[in-house]
């Protein structure tokens, strides 16, 4: 069974076919968050601190870290993003112990993150453009880390799922040329908004099955993309995630502070037999009860974790890092 192993200084998270679904917290990202972007430019990291602790308390097993701020004073990300990436990673690592996902389109920022991150982070991402492959894959090999492979190339994002599969296959093959094994490639097949494309859900479920069966790779996605532009987005997300898990998806970059989505994931883990003896579901039931009695989701989750003893969140440390 394919397993992609991520590590911090003290904790392991495993993305795998027979593992609990890996929740990658998305909130440390200034894209579309003007307030956070302004704070980061001003050297204010209070929201980053709060989001790091909150996401882990709510069940994130990995934290995505993006430092892509467009500075008003200097719009060149090649200059501004690498030092900011270092600073944010150092800060987050000082607050939480989960592995990180280094998220940038700037190669210098990726390398700065790889130099700073402890353990074995995930890199987000590489696409099928040849220049991107030639730039990012050597970094992946140099630092021996896994990478998210996004299924678009020089032609853009295709609405044809066969084309997106072909791009994923190309990336896996090119990675092999650099000596990077398939178990260190986590493919994002690209989730289209179902409000704009009625077949978006069925497309991604089919793609995930093919990626698993034909390429033997783990998968991820930006889960909220499926509901973009729709009302009551969290309800759509909460339906999408268990269906994607049933199709074989093994992780998602998502907002873990929403209880409805996390409840859906916990239930899917139970139904997929990825929750031995239902221990995590029973623990989560206590969280729901506490929320119904007036506690916040984060507070209830943190309290449940502190009384769970040797919980499983963070992966099965005894298993090999190899696929």
Image: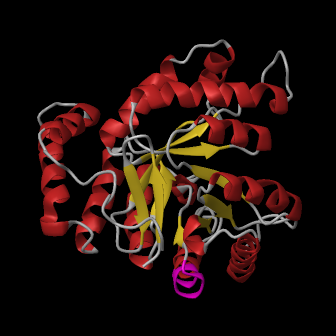
Is 46 drawn above or below residue 9 in the view shown? above
Q: For residue 34, what is the image quadrant?
A: top right
Vertical relation: 59 (above or below) 155:
above
Q: Residue at x 17, y 34 (%)?
A: 303
Q: Is residue 212 magenta?
A: yes
259 or 197: nearer the viewer: 259
Residue 234 % position (x, y):
42, 51
Q: Can residue 57 be seen by looking at this rendering?
A: yes
Residue displayed at 61% across by 61% down: 193
Q: Position of residue 252 (x, y in %)?
A: 49, 57
Q: Residue at x 38, y 76 (%)?
A: 246
Q: Describe residue 247's horizontal placement relative to residue 318 as left or right.
A: right
Please name whichever residue, 253 or 313, is drawn nearer the observer in this view of the structure: 313
Q: Residue furthest bottom?
A: 214
Instruction: Check residue 18 for magenta coloring.
Output: no
Q: Position of residue 205 (x, y in %)?
A: 51, 77
x 44%, y 76%: residue = 248
Q: Can you say which quadrant of the picture contains the N terminus?
A: bottom left
Left or right of 279 on screen, residue 2: right
| Main SS of residues in magenta | helix
Q: Quadrant of residue 268?
A: bottom left
Between 200 and 303, the residue placed more toward the observer is 303
Q: Is residue 49 above or below residue 220?
A: above
Name the spot of residue 298 as percent of width and height, x first. 28, 34
Q: Which span is picked out in magenta?
A: 209-216
Q: How many marks?
A: 0
Q: Which colour style is shown?
A: secondary structure
């Amino acid at each position: 069974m394919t397993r992609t192993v991520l590590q911090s200084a003290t904790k392991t998270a495993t993305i795998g076919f027979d593992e609990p679904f890996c929740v990658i917290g998305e909130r440390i990202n200034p894209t579309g968050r003007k307030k956070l972007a302004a704070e980061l430019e001003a050297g204010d990291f209070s929201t980053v601190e709060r989001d790091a602790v909150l996401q882990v308390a709510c069940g994130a097993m990995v934290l995505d870290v993006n430092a892509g701020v467009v500075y008003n004073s200097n719009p060149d990300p090649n200059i501004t993003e690498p030092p900011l990436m270092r600073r944010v990673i150092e800060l987050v690592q000082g607050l939480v112990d989960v592995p990180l996902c280094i998220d940038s389109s700037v190669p210098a920022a990726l390398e700065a993150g790889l130099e700073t991150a402890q353990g074995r982070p995930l890199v987000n991402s590489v696409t099928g453009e040849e220049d991107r492959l030639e730039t990012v894959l050597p970094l992946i090999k140099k630092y021996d880390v896994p990478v998210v492979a996004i299924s678009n190339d020089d032609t853009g994002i295709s609405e044809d799922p066969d084309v997106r599969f072909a791009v994923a296959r190309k990336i896996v093959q090119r990675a092999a040329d650099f000596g990077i094994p398939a178990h260190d490639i986590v493919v994002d097949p690209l989730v289209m908004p179902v409000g704009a494309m009625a077949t978006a859900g069925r497309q991604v479920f089919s793609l995930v099955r093919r990626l698993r069966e034909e390429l033997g790779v783990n998968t991820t996605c930006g889960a909220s993309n499926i509901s973009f532009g729709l009302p009551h987005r969290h309800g759509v997300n909460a339906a999408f995630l268990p269906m994607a898990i049933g199709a074989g998806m093994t992780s998602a970059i998502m907002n873990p502070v929403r209880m409805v989505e996390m409840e859906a994931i916990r239930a899917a883990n139970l139904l997929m037999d990825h929750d031995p003896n239902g221990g995590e579901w029973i623990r989560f039931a206590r969280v729901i009860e506490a929320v119904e009695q007036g506690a916040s989701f984060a507070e209830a989750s943190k309290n449940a974790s502190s009384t769970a003893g040797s919980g499983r969140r963070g992966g099965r440390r005894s298993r090999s890092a190899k696929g």
